[in-house]
Structures are given as structure tokens and as C-alpha cells.
Image: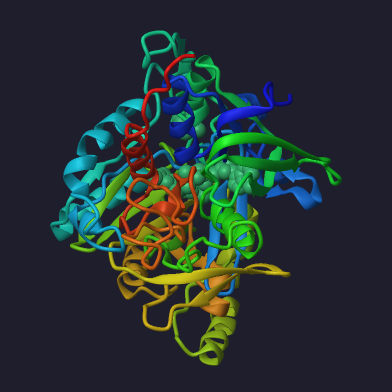
Amino acid sequence: MKPQKQKYDFVIIGSGFGGAVSALRLSEKNYSVLVIEKGKHYKPEDFPKNNWQLRKWLWLPGLKMFGIQKLTFLKHISIMSGVGVGGGSLVYANTLPKPKMPFFKQGSWKDLDDWAEKLSPYYELAWQMLGASVNPYLGPADLVLKKIAEQTGKDFKPAKVGVYFGKPGQTVDDPYFEGKGPARTGCTFCGACMTGCRDNAKNSLDKNYLYLARQNGAEILAEHKVIDLIPLDNTGEKGYEVIFKRSTTYFGQKKSVKANAVIFAGGVLGTVPLLLKLKKKRLPKLSAQLGKMVRTNNESLIFSTVYKGDFVNKMSEGIAIGSIMTYDKNSHIEPVRYGKGSGVWGTLLVPLIEDKNFWKRNLKLFFKLLISLPVKLKILLTQDFASSSTVLLFMQHLDSTIHLKTSFFGLSSRLDKEKNAPTAFIPEALNFARAFSKTIGAIPQVLFTESVSGIPSTAHILGGACMGRTAKEGVIDKNHKVFGYQNLYVFDGSSISANPGVNPSLTITALTEYGMQKFPIKKEN
Ligand SMILES: Cc1cc2nc3c(=O)[nH]c(=O)nc-3n(C[C@H](O)[C@H](O)[C@H](O)COP(=O)(O)OP(=O)(O)OC[C@H]3O[C@@H](n4cnc5c(N)ncnc54)[C@H](O)[C@@H]3O)c2cc1C
Ligand code: SF4
């Protein structure tokens, strides 16, 4: 496919939550829209059967692997993100919690609007568009968490998720958009949401926003990466030339289209490096805040793998995230599962060791590895790793930031001197993981980068192009307009200007909905 026009009202870079909402709302307002997405357009049957099908799971284009899951290892954080038409929604765990009040009252956006009040109707709209409903089935991991919550007096809820819960396996005509949307199939609770739903039950963005945007005439160009942007005058008032090339061949030819306006929606790992590159040459007036205030949910991701008892090979039952527990006023915990057979993570895990001293930690790790070898071998040889494991996702409102830079060697991270950095060793998370594991006969393990190098992991990377009152405070204003240039906007996770403390996709969707309603309807010529 190639673009049908030489010039568009809007070119949108990336088709994740921010890009998909923008595409629909702008096309509804009569604007011509081109979405450029570097990943593939996956149909349900194209998704991997499990994550051992590495070419369909991982995004490593240099090795001809064009999957939906990207892994990025930086000095201060290991990041998981999604790639493809639908962005992170292809690989995400469907869960759509609304952040609590602290989110709306902190960070660089706090005084720019009454966010809690203004965004409230847009959270409702986002839930509706993403087909959110309360998970009707608690799998074994959810029931264990529920029991712990009851015993410790904590709040436990089934998760609100973007999944179609019709009759399992039965396909029906569009149940969400008065017949304008695609047919949907009832969820089978196979737990495989994070390797892509092969059953057509997950409400990923290609099933709602992008599907409807296409009906309005929006074009989606998959397998192309935007690599440059040339303003047509000093200010961007006359628009931009957008340069892109094929992302799934080694020697893609450069092509271009013109746009009156451009929306950056490539997610933090797409938008921030591209803007940093543009600041060096094409767009020098971009704010010096670019790449700063990059944050996570202050998360901890700890695998708890059962090696004895009733739960062996049972933990995949349910949807990827079926429930949420409030741990304390700052923290939430969700039990996360992969589908049967998705055992790749098992090869990258080591025991949980939290000593802050590198040498002591690695010495302890060495002995712990020796001691736990029989259990690891038992799991490897006699069990299915994924269906014996629960990933305990611990998230906090507390803030910690790093900043991102680009150089000849690519993207790198730096610590913010005056701020806390994300840590791999959150005491509450580690204590909970140990207690949870003990209850079910499991061992707690983490990605090797955490125990070996003390580098935390995240699936929720946010910020880097945050809001501010002026260019001194932020990269964009409260309407997502980039300071320093006309007709440039950022609508994605990089514009999230505080830590939501919970999974962020609903918030990115709501914030983009709110921003989009401010664009005027284009008068027909
Ligand atoms: C395993 C996993 C599970 C998750 N589970 C949840 C969950 O349950 N709930 C939740 O709320 N969040 C979850 N998340 C996080 C969620 O996926 C992200 O926060 C969200 O997708 C970010 O949305 P976005 O709009 O910033 O862009 P993204 O969804 O990241 O999309 C950006 C898109 O832009 C494309 N792109 C980037 N650069 C370019 C370029 N130069 N040219 C063309 N295309 C480009 C990328 O390929 C990508 O498709 C999960 C993430 C992972 C990895
Ligand atoms: S549990 Fe299985 S069927 Fe249900 S949404 Fe997830 S992948 Fe699809």
C-alpha cells in the first residue's frame, strides 16, 4: 500500500492509543489523515501460538523478526513496549484502571487545568470505546490474591478490561458500535492476551478506533517508519514534509508526504528519540525539557513460579490481568499471566536478590542460583513454565524519573540528580512477592538485569515530552501543542506528565479524547 494523497491535513506517527484516538476523531471532523506505523498489521490468526515463535513475538527488524513485542535495555531501565497496527494494545494485558486523585494533582501538568474534573467524562468515553467491562472469571492467581486481600483487610476487585465476554468462542456481529464495528468472538480465558489474541476477543485498537477511522477515510500505512520531518518554513505554519521508509526491509527507499500538521504518537520510545533527533537539526527551538521527566509506574515485575502443589500448570487460566488489589495508599498489585507454552521468560529469570551493593548481591545470587537449581530443573523438565507462573505487577503513585538522550550509539538513559530514579528493589513489592510465593509453593524470580545489575523493568514507560506552562517547564502545552513550532502535537504516553500509579492506556486514551475535542470541525470546501 502507498499513501493515496501527496498532502494530508494530519500525518500521525504511530498507531497506539494516542495515534488511534487522534485518527478517529480527526477523520470524523473531515480532516484527511494518514497514520504511519512501523509495525505489521496482524490479523488474529497471525499472532504467535506462544512466545517461542520468536519471529512473530519479538520486534527485532535487524534480525527479520517483525513481532509485536519490543524489548529495550537501557542503563537505568529495561522497557517492554508494543509494535504494530494498534501499538501497545496488541501486546497489552487489557486492563483499564482509572488513576486515583494524586495523579491529577502532581507533576508538571498539575496547575494547567482541573484535570480530574475535565477528564472525568473522557474516562467514561474511553471505557466505552475500548469496550471495557468487569472481568467475569477469576482464575487461580486472582483467587489467591483475593484470599490474601480478605485475610489482610485490603481492597480487591476484578479488573475492568477491554475484552469481549460473549459466549466463549462464539462470533457475533459488532456488539459495540451499532453495527459499524467488526464482528467479535467471546473470550475463552486462555490467558494469552500478551502474545496477541488469536481468538478475536481482545478489543485492541484495530477493532475499535482504527477500524472506525478507516471507515471515515483515514489511511493506515503499516510497515513504514518515520525518520525525518522538514518544516516548510521557519515556524511550521506552512506545514511539514514527513520522510519515512519501509521498516521491514533492509534497504527501504525514502519516501515523503506533506502534512499541514503532524501528531507524534509513537509512544515514548518512538516519539522521544525522533524529537531528540529533530531538535539537533530540523527543529532546534524544541524545549530543553525534551527527554526529561521520563517515568514508570514505579513498578516491580516479579515472577512467582509454582513448583509443587495444586497450582502447577494451572496459572494460565483467565485473562492476562483479571484482578487488582490496593496494597496501601500508594500501591496496587495485579497478578498477570501468559498463555500455556509461552515459556521464553523462564530462560531470562534468576532468583530475587535485593542487596544494593553490586558485589554482595551477585555473590548472594551465585549461591542462590546453586541452591535453587534443582527446583529450576524440575520446573524446566516436568512443567509448563507459563502456566505455572504468575507475574506480580506492583505499581506505585510515588514518583521517580530518569531522562533519555540520543547519540551516535542510539538511545541512552541518565539519572536526574535531584530526583529519585526507578529502583528494582521496592521493599513492599519484594516482601509481597515472597509471601505470595510461599502461600502457593512457588519461587519468586526476576529478569536477570534486576538481580545482576539492579536495573528495574517496566511495561509502562511514560513522559519525556511532558506538559508545562512554557517551553522552560515542558515540551508541550496543555493542549498537547509543541512549544516553538506551529502545527506539531504529541498525543501518546510521552505526554503523560505525572505518574498515574496504575496501568496507563486508559489515561492516554482519555487525555487524547479530551485534547481532540478541542480541534475544530473542518469546513467542507
Ligand atoms: C506486555 C505489556 C502489557 C501491558 N499491559 C497493559 C495493560 O494491561 N493496561 C495498560 O493500561 N497498559 C498496558 N501496557 C502499556 C501500554 O501498552 C502502553 O502504555 C501504551 O500502549 C502506550 O500507548 P502510546 O499511545 O504511548 O503508544 P504505543 O501503544 O506504544 O504505540 C506507539 C506505536 O508507534 C509506532 N512507532 C513508533 N515510532 C514510530 C515511527 N518513527 N514511525 C512509525 N511508527 C512508529 C510503534 O511501532 C507503536 O506501534 C502494557 C505494555 C506491555 C508491553
Ligand atoms: S484470554 Fe485468550 S481469548 Fe480472552 S482476550 Fe485474552 S487471548 Fe483473547
Q: Is residue 366 visible to the viewer in this orientation of the structure?
A: yes
Q: Is 218 placed above or below 322 here?
A: above
Q: Is residue 148 in sight in this rendering?
A: no
Residue plotted at (39% across, 57% down): 393
Residue 472 drawn at (x, y percent): 39, 68
> To which quarter of the image does residue 444 belong?
bottom left
Q: Whole-percent x and y of residue 245? A: 76, 41
Q: Residue at x 30, y 71 (%)?
A: 428
Q: Tell me the residue at 35%/39% (across/down).
A: 515
Q: How far across and down, in percent of the image, does residue 408 sit?
A: 73, 69
Residue 160 location (% of width, % of height) = 30, 37
In this figure, which colouring scheme has been used for the structure?
rainbow
Total numbered labels placed on residues in the image: 0
Comparing 55 with 8, the one in front is: 8
Above-or-below relation of 233 to 193? below
Extreme residue toward the right, this view:
251
390 vs 105, nearest the viewer: 105
Q: Is residue 429 left or right of residue 304?
A: left
Q: Nearer the viewer, residue 365 or 227?
A: 227
402 up-or-down from 493: above or below: below
Q: Is residue 443 left or right of residue 241?
A: left
- The structure residue drawn at horizontal position 44% and vertical position 11%, both measured from the top left corner, is 180
Asked if residue 279 lies left or right of residue 395, the reply is right
Q: Residue furthest left?
A: 153
**In the image shown, does 168 or 129 lie closer to the viewer?**
129
Position of the N terminus, as image quadrant, is top right
Q: Quadrant of residue 118?
A: top left
